[in-house]
Amino acid sequence: MCLRFIGGDGTVSKSNVFDLLGPIMVGPSSSHTAGAVRLGTMARKILGEEPLEGIVTLHGSFAETGKGHGTDVALIAGLLGMAPDDERIPDAPEIAKERGLKVRFEKADLGDVHPNTVKFDLTGPKERVEIIGSSIGGGAILIRQINNFRVGINGDYPTLVILHQDLPGVVAQVTLLLATAQINIATMRVSREKKGAQALMVLETDQKIDEAVLDLTRRLPSIKQALAIEPLE
Amino acid sequence: MRAYEDWVVEAETKGLKISSIVLQNQIEELELSEEALFERMGKNLKVMRESVKIGLSGKRRSASGLVGGDAAKVEERRKSGTTLIGGPMSGAIAKALAVAEVNASMGRIVAAPTAGSCGVLPAVLFTLEEIFHSGEEELLSALFTAAGLGIIITERANVSGAEGGCQAEIGSAAAMSAAAAVELAGGSPRQTAHGAAIALKSMLGLVCDPVAGLVEVPCVKRNATGAMIALTAAEMALAGVKSAIPIDEVIDTMAEIGHQMSCSLKETAQGGLAVTPTGRKIRADFL
Ligand code: SF4
């Protein structure tokens, strides 16, 4: 496929009738509008609380053609928790004002990343987080980085994100806990700042991760933070 | 890799419609009941219907101001009784423009198969509904036929302007719509294949060259011409006209042509209409 500098309406290879007829979405572009809403929604889920302030940096095609595709408006809609078919999406900036969410947009070269990439610096009442994600076509997205950690979250599965000390046995504790709770792990990735320092574990699971399991995870030794992200619709 | 021909043969041997074969296939693949599939497809049909209505009202404009109000103009001319090509055809043009305008102005649509090509199928479907007074279930079945062909297209080629040019988006939409129209009009499974093949053949080579990278120019109007090609192809197929090249081979050709197409003509806005003097000016003014 050609390297795309300017966006349009790309889609990924699909296989069932509802991939061909659907999604139901607010236009004009599955990658620049629907995908942008989903990126905003994922960022909100990762923050884990109502965002109050956001600095949103647009890269590549998002920066170049975002305006015409309503990418900025769509990202705000996502941060407000709207779905890609929500007809209030065009009004998201006003709704954000009413709800006390301040968003500032910037444009920057984020390096060697997908042309449709965005960085969120989000602040909530208690938390702060930096997230980088891309809209990879047909409305599909990929969260690539949370704070300093590289991840690969597409929102298809319930996802458990754990910040922990890089020590032997931590991973085993978590997987054991999930096994006991009858939660099957679909994918797993661990990345760390440096040996023995902080590490991030990302697990995609087949079953929903409920509050009780999350709570038990948080109580494990060496775990600093744990977050359960529900899949996107 | 599956072939549409296999579904045609299966439908012929069992004496079923293509939509039944697609449904059967999807019941297994998605592990959903027929009712659940119909219900979910019903949501698509509802949104399609709404988007036609909203677009025809003519109130929506795109952010760039390039698009909006044309559906209403065509509809008005149709209602005045002075049309060059007859009421149903001009109605289809209006409907296709309507849905594409809604998309361009951040309204709600069903990607069919993409957002850029969302107007073709609703235009064809609701035009046939007006002619044949089709019931809800027939319309939904026709959507399964359209989507079924779309599945074959994604397996053998693609439905993305970035990968295959506009022939993959509006072209696929036209082929899917032609198949749906033939079935809805009472044509045979074999005739749906001919209709789809004739429609896609007419779209081969069409490049993706959106001005300023926006899904507006030429996208909106191509939805209307795509719907015309779909209806023309369906009319031929229903009359017994055959496509010399079978649908699966046309789809493979579409993939191959997309492959040979220069990157500048695949949604990068670096070629075609996007780089005309006017296209460049629009881009400079807006961005
Ligand atoms: S020109 Fe490109 S963006 Fe526009 S409808 Fe065709 S494929 Fe889609």
Image (cartoon, rainbow, N blue to C red):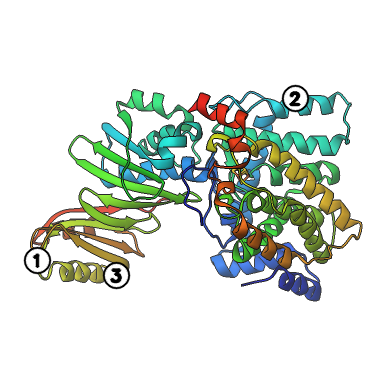
User: Dot 3, crowdedness within 10 Å: few (<14), some or many (≥20)?
Assistant: few
- Quadrant of residue A60 in the image? top left
Task: Look at 69% across and 41% down and name the residue there.
Answer: B223
**Contact (Cβ within 8 Å) of mark 2 with mark 3:** no
Closer to the N terminus: mark 1 or mark 3?
Answer: 1
Q: Position of residue A195 (x, y in %)?
A: 10, 63
Whole-percent x, y for residue B284 in the image = 51, 27
Q: Residue at x 20, y 61 (%)?
A: A191
Does the numbered disc 2 mark a residue whose Cβ is under 8 Å from ligand 1?
no
Check disc 2 and give the amino acid type.
Answer: Lys
Give me the C-alpha separation between circle 2 and circle 1: 69 Å
Q: Chain of mark 2?
A: B
The x and y percentages for residue B247 are: 75, 64
Residue type, label 1: Leu
Q: Secondary structure at mark 3?
A: loop
What mark, if any, has residue A182 been given in the picture? Answer: 3
Mark 2 vs mark 3: give the one in front: 2
Residue placed under numbered mark 1 in the picture: A167
In this rendering, the answer to whether A179 lies above or below B192 is: below
What element does badge 2 sit on?
A: helix
Give the left or right position of residue B156, taking residue B141 as reference: left
Residue A37 appears in the figure: no
The residue nearer to you, when weighing A102 against A95, is A102
As drawn, the label of residue B73 is: 2
Name the residue located 56 percent from the left edge and 68 percent from the top edge: B29
> How many tags in the picture?
3
Q: Tell me residue A205's x, y (percent).
A: 33, 64
Amino acid on which disc 3 is placed: Gln
Same chain for mark 1 and mark 3? The answer is yes
